């Protein structure tokens, strides 16, 4: 390749390779989605169309990047976990976060009409992306546990908050004041005693978020036999305890 006298400017580029032997997480998060959800008439407290769209966009990312072994999403965010030994983009942090975030955002717009067939985005949605490293298996499990605990805390609050507004007729300020200082037990009691809502029977996707995991599953062959094929499986289950990790022990094993 021919060079010019201007080639020296490349020396200003910084090296941002992620440390080896570390889990790489790229988290994508909606920017200003409180406003976005309001202006696009998202249903409260949860819009299943919007959550399904987020899952669809995340599937697109996992289909493109085979080294993502697991993704976890809730609300307007998604975390993508790259295998410890991945060499995608030579482990360059900026390349990983910008490509994942760019693809997620474009897929979100691309699939919009499948989930919101009677409307179109009023303006482009924006997601930011960041890259975080976790050196140990326990660290990555604790990170995902943190995000799922956050899902539970936020969803329980939002479910109670919007029940007070939509069913009890309170204003947002009054609902906020009523919930101020309450614990999870208090919110469960409000839901059950005032609205006959058993929070534990709410859809698991709302309470636990969505896990996308790459797993080998048996595929039927024309001759009647089967063969294993890697597929992306969607689940809504607990990832804080050990059961999920025991069932998917390949996730924490370096291949």
Image (cartoon, grey):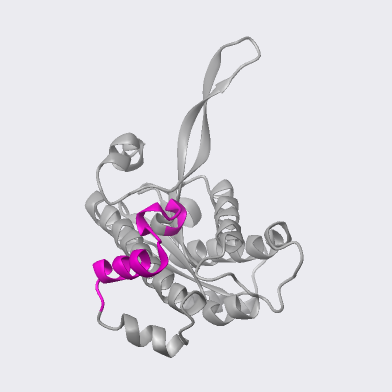
When the figure is inspected, residue 144 is found, relative to residue 228, above or below; the finding is below
- Measuring from the top left, give residue 244's x and y in whole percent: 32, 41
When the figure is inspected, residue 236 is found, relative to residue 198, above or below; the finding is above
Magenta-drawn segment: 182-206
User: In the current view of this chain or complex, which residue is farthest to the bottom?
Assistant: 173
Magenta span includes 201: yes
The majority secondary structure of the magenta stretch comes to helix
Q: In this view, does 142 lie to the left or right of 206?
A: left
Could you tell me how many numbered marks the image carries? 0
When the figure is inspected, residue 32 is found, relative to residue 98, above or below; the finding is below
- Measuring from the top left, give residue 209's x and y in whole percent: 43, 56
- Measuring from the top left, give residue 170's x and y in whole percent: 45, 84
The answer to which image quadrant residue 8 occupies is: bottom right
Front-lying residue, 204 or 36: 204
- Measuring from the top left, give residue 165's x and y in whole percent: 48, 79
Front-lying residue, 49 or 130: 49
């Amino acid at each position: 390749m021919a060079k010019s006298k201007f080639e020296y400017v490349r020396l200003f580029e910084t090296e941002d390779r992620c440390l080896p032997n570390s889990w790489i997480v790229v988290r994508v998060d909606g920017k200003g989605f409180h406003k976005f959800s309001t202006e696009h008439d998202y249903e409260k407290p949860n819009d299943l169309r919007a959550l399904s769209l987020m899952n669809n966009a995340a599937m697109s990312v996992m289909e493109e990047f085979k080294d993502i072994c697991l993704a976890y999403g809730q609300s307007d965010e998604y975390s993508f976990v790259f295998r410890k030994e991945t060499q995608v983009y030579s482990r360059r942090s900026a390349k990983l976060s910008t490509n994942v975030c760019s693809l997620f955002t474009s897929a979100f717009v691309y699939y919009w009409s499948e989930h919101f067939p009677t409307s179109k985005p009023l303006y482009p949605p924006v997601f930011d992306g960041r890259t975080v490293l976790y050196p140990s298996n326990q660290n990555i499990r604790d990170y995902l546990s943190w995000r799922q605990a956050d899902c539970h805390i936020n969803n329980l609050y939002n479910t109670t908050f919007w029940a007070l507004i939509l069913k009890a007729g309170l204003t947002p300020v009054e609902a906020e004041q009523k919930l101020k200082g309450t614990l999870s037990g208090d919110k469960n009691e409000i839901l059950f005693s005032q609205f006959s809502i058993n929070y534990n029977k709410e859809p698991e996707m709302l309470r636990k978020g969505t896990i996308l995991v790459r797993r080998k599953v048996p595929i039927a062959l024309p001759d009647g036999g089967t063969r294993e094929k890697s597929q992306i499986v969607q689940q809504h289950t607990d990832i804080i305890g050990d059961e999920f990790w025991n069932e998917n022990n390949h996730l924490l094993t370096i291949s």
